[in-house]
Image (cartoon, helix red, strand yellow):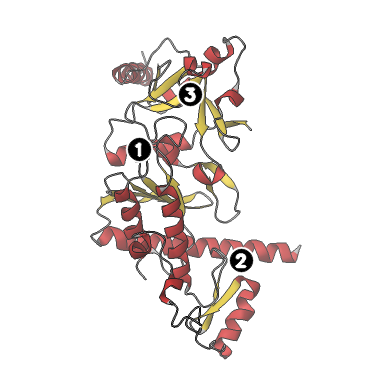
Amino acid sequence: MPMHEENDELSDAETRAHLSAIGDDNEIPGDEILYKRLPTDEKEWLVKDQITGKPVRPTSGAFVPHPDGISVYRNSIMASQDPPLGPADLAVSSTNYILSFTAAQARSISLGIKNDAWPEGIADADHPRNAAHALIVGLEKLGKKEKIRRQKEFSRLDFRFVYP
Amino acid sequence: MNLCIMLGGGAMTILEDRRPVSSGATSQPDPPPELPNVDAARQFYLYGADAVYYGGSYVTTLCAYPSASGIGRREALLEEAARELLRLRKLPQGWDGYRAAQISKAAIYGAGWVLDAILAADSCKPQVFPTADGGVQIEWYADGDEITIDIDPAGEAAVLAEFDGETVAEDIFDPQTPDESILQIASLVKEISARIVQAKRGNRADARGK
């Protein structure tokens, strides 16, 4: 076996081991669409290019984890609700933005995804969207420098803005 | 005026220096305006409508908040930053629709100390964001170059700066203790601000040439 293939396999194995260690649920498929809410209004969490004045991406500050991880919602579970839910059901204010990315994108920067349905101690805890609640994990236990670097990587993923 | 003084006990502003002197007067009179000299007129010619006059010269506002006339540009930047930080401090717990913490006083003061130490009259306005853990993030961004300063809820700061795709600063520092990190960040803010002004001026010249 050529050396580079062996290295690639080793790398994949290491990646899987790492994801497993941080609590990634490998039953969540890579093509699962995840939604993240950017709260309040565009002033809060979108970085603007100060030359053009146009927003370029979410601030990496939007990916500072809570003690348990970063709050996201799974599209497949939202769509399976009766009636089905969409990104607009995640907005808690008319000024919220909702962005989407895939589980594979999160895993590509060594972060994991785990289910966290019906989280307690939040506003609107009984809203049906909370059946689809999940957490991005892996940032919360990093040292400060590494965490900031990884948050920055996260903020540079190719997101889709799906709401409004 | 120190930004942390502006943050203490409410939104104190520069205008508070002008207190009423008698029941018939609302405030002390403003000093007479300083007239521009030839050099200032030359700068006005260079910067045109993008300039404000203070301290004896015109200064470009290409990357500034509009500043009140008669107020130094650095003070105007600090006042605006203080307003932003006080706004963040008022965000309620759960402001992200999940479990975001209220922005801590230590983070607000830490951000104040950092900005007070690094902002100069020719600095571009920082972008200030709340973080879900109760901290504050400060950023400058220009065509892929960026400076990010993270102040955590305990008030400890970290910087990550990338210019031309290369990391030019990555450090953890105490905002209350001016050291080499702060000097380096101040220098980088100066550099990115100059890049922003230069690019905007170029864009404007291109637009005029079309």
Instruction: State the quadrant of the C terminus of chain B.
Output: bottom right
Residue picked out by circle 1: B133
**Chain under numbered label 1:** B
Question: Residue A62, how many percent across, how many down?
Answer: 45, 38
Checking the image for residue B201, the label placed there is 2
Amino acid, disc 1: Asp
Contact flag, marks 2 and 1 (Cβ < 8 Å): no
Q: Is residue B28 above or below residue A83?
A: below
**CA distance for labels 2 and 1:** 38 Å
Contact flag, marks 3 and 1 (Cβ < 8 Å): no
**Chain under numbered label 3:** A
Quadrant of residue B190 in the image?
Answer: bottom left
Residue picked out by circle 3: A124
Question: Residue A11, how many percent across, how many down?
Answer: 34, 21
Question: Residue B129, how many percent across, how many down?
Answer: 44, 47
Local secondary structure at mark 1: loop
Q: Residue at x 34, y 65 (%)?
A: B5
Q: Residue at x 40, y 12 (%)?
A: A26
Checking the image for residue B189, the label placed there is none
Local secondary structure at mark 2: helix
Amino acid, disc 2: Arg
Q: Are marks 3 and 1 on the same chain?
A: no
Q: Residues within 10 Å of mark 2 (few under 14, many from 20)?
A: some
Q: Is residue A31 above or below residue B197?
A: above
Q: Residue at x 41, y 68 (%)?
A: B120
Q: Between residue A146 and residue B136, name the one nearer to us.
A: B136
Q: Residues within 10 Å of mark 3 (few under 14, many from 20)?
A: few
**Chain under numbered label 2:** B
Quadrant of residue B47 in the image?
Answer: bottom right
